[in-house]
Image: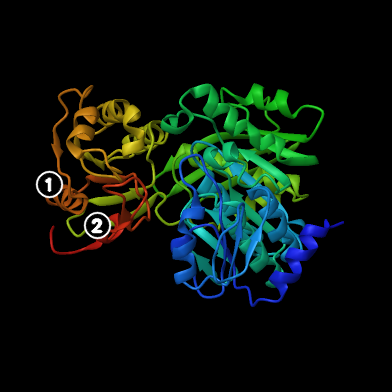
């Protein structure tokens, strides 16, 4: 049932040729409706004129505004979202949603699950890699977009008869309730480590944000959780008696889904999957032990959907790693390059511990720390010095923090491991190539497939960067 106010506003919107709804004035194009919102630090009502200049056909605002285009007044941003839902005829309700959160592994689990589901039905992905809807690839500013952007995407999914929406849910999005109107069929917690304390301030606040995923799961939906994670008990207790649960783990017979007999190489992993009385051997193309946990999360989701263990296990064997995740390249001098997104202390430790075991010769690491993770910098530098034979520290989205400040933090706990400090990321990678020899492994981590840097003003402006893989592939050196 609609309120009289919503009905009147809908009549106005339906008289316009609405393209999409936008909350960022700089992204408005001809025919878009600009939604104003009073935030904690920014009031987007102040950018209404910019939206008008860019071609907005109407505004949805929370106060009266004198503009030469229709202005719809709502009581709050949430009422504005209710209007957008009604205009699109509630597209989120026609989808089956799988939400994935975790300090690390969100993108790999979500993207690979999307690959598998698209073989037998129509699935879409929303996350760090953007939005993938059928043949559409849509760049996104955030891992989990705002509610209006999500509704735009869900509307596109509806037009293309998409069945499943696989989406990453970041701790920021969960704490800000960006996707609070989305009821999940399955919620996945890959792990809960240590990250984003610049925003959450405390570890407890960060953990609480992650656990909010459980509250988004519809009754009799399923929570998939890593039983080896220290916060598994808290997640299970929160979900008890409200949703179904399916646990996974490596070498833990108490888990519903268990992986044993791991054999890992740089080309992939071989292991046994055990689920109840069923057992099968899987040859996964995803290298490193931590990716076995990601495989387990994917298989657990498929099991919750009614797949057999055999069907799920076979589906794993033809997966392709997402761009910028464990991406290898052979260099002309016989060294090997590896590009990975590992960008926090937990992810970096897992990556370097695994690659150290497989490095035929020296391990050369190229990495930086983002300006908002400076509190992790000393630990990340120490991790590099523990596992690497040579470290080249460089820039990785300094976001307004002076690079020399980041270098001091990165090197504050380092031992006598040889190191360089080079601000230009491309030059740092080129130096690693110049110094490498046959059998060396060069690990470039932090940015994955990103082709931009945030330098001076937080995330206000993206500066073009050729990308880590492109620099490694360039043949001007070595």
- In this view of the protein, which residue sits in the foreground, 407 or 190? 407
Q: Is residue 186 left or right of residue 289?
A: right
Helix, strand, or loop for circle 1? helix
- In this view of the protein, which residue sits in the foreground, 49 or 362? 49
Q: Which numbered dot is residue 70? A: none
Q: Quadrant of the N terminus?
A: bottom right
- In this view of the protein, which residue sits in the foreground, 198 or 214? 198
Tell me which residue sits at (70%, 26%) in the image: 236
462 to 340, vertically: above or below: below
Asked if one can make out residue 389 in the rendered structure from this viewpoint, the answer is no
Q: Disc 1 and disc 2: Cα gap in Å?
A: 13 Å
Q: Is residue 399 left or right of residue 478?
A: right
Asked if one can make out residue 208 in the rendered structure from this viewpoint, the answer is yes
Name the quadrant containing residue 241.
top right
328 to 169, vertically: above or below: below
Give the labeled residue for mark 2: 472
Give the image location of residue 267, x and y in percent: 41, 50
Tell me which residue sits at (65%, 65%) in the image: 119
Q: Quadrant of the C terminus?
A: bottom left
Q: Residues within 10 Å of mark 2 (few under 14, many from 20)?
A: many
Q: Are marks 1 and 2 in contact (CB under 8 Å)?
A: no
Helix, strand, or loop for circle 2? helix
Give the labeled residue for mark 1: 435
Give the image location of residue 330, x and y in percent: 27, 57
């Amino acid at each position: 049932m609609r309120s009289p106010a919503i009905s009147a506003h809908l009549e106005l919107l339906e008289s316009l040729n609405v393209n999409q709804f936008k909350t960022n004035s700089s992204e408005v194009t001809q025919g878009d409706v600009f939604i104003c919102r009073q935030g904690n630090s920014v009031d987007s009502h102040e950018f209404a004129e910019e939206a008008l200049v860019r071609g907005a056909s109407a505004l949805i605002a929370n106060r009266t505004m004198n503009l030469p285009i229709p202005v719809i007044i709502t009581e709050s941003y949430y009422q504005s979202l209710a209007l957008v839902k009604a205009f699109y005829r509630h597209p989120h309700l026609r989808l089956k949603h799988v939400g994935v959160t975790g300090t690390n592994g969100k993108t790999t689990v979500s993207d690979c699950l999307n690959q598998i589901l698209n073989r037998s039905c129509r699935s879409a992905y929303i996350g760090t890699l953007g939005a993938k809807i059928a043949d559409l690839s849509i760049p996104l500013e955030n891992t989990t977009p705002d509610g209006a952007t999500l509704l735009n995407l869900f509307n596109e999914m509806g037009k293309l008869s998409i069945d499943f929406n696989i989406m990453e849910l970041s701790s920021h999005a969960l704490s800000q309730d960006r996707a609070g109107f989305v009821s999940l069929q399955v919620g996945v917690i890959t792990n809960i480590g240590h990250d984003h304390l610049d925003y959450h301030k405390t570890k407890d606040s960060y953990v609480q944000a992650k656990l909010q995923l459980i509250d988004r799961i519809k009754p009799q939906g399923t929570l998939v959780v890593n039983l080896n994670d220290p916060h598994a008990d808290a997640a299970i207790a929160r979900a008890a008696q409200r949703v179904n649960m399916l646990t996974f783990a490596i070498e833990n017979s108490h888990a519903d889904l268990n992986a044993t007999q791991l054999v890992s190489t740089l080309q992939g992993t071989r292991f046994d999957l055990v689920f109840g009385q069923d057992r099968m051997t899987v040859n996964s193309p995803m290298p490193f032990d931590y990716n076995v946990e990601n495989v387990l999360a994917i298989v657990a989701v498929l099991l919750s959907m009614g797949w057999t263990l055999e069907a799920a296990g076979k589906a794993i064997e033809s997966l392709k790693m997402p761009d910028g995740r464990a991406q290898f390249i052979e260099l002309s001098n016989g060294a090997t390059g590896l590009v990975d997104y590992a960008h926090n202390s937990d992810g970096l430790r897992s990556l370097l511990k695994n690659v150290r075991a497989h490095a035929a010769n020296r391990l050369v690491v190229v990495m930086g720390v983002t300006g908002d993770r400076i509190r992790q910098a000393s630990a990340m530098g120490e991790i590099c010095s523990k596992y690497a034979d040579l470290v080249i520290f460089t820039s990785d989205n300094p976001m307004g923090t002076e690079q020399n400040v980041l270098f001091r933090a990165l090197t504050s706990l380092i031992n006598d491991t040889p190191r360089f400090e080079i601000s230009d990321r491309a030059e740092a990678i080129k130096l690693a190539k110049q110094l490498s020899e046959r059998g060396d492994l060069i690990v470039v981590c932090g940015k994955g497939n990103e082709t931009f840097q945030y330098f001076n003003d937080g995330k206000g402006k993206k500066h073009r960067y050729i990308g880590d893989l492109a620099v490694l592939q360039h043949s001007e050196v070595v």
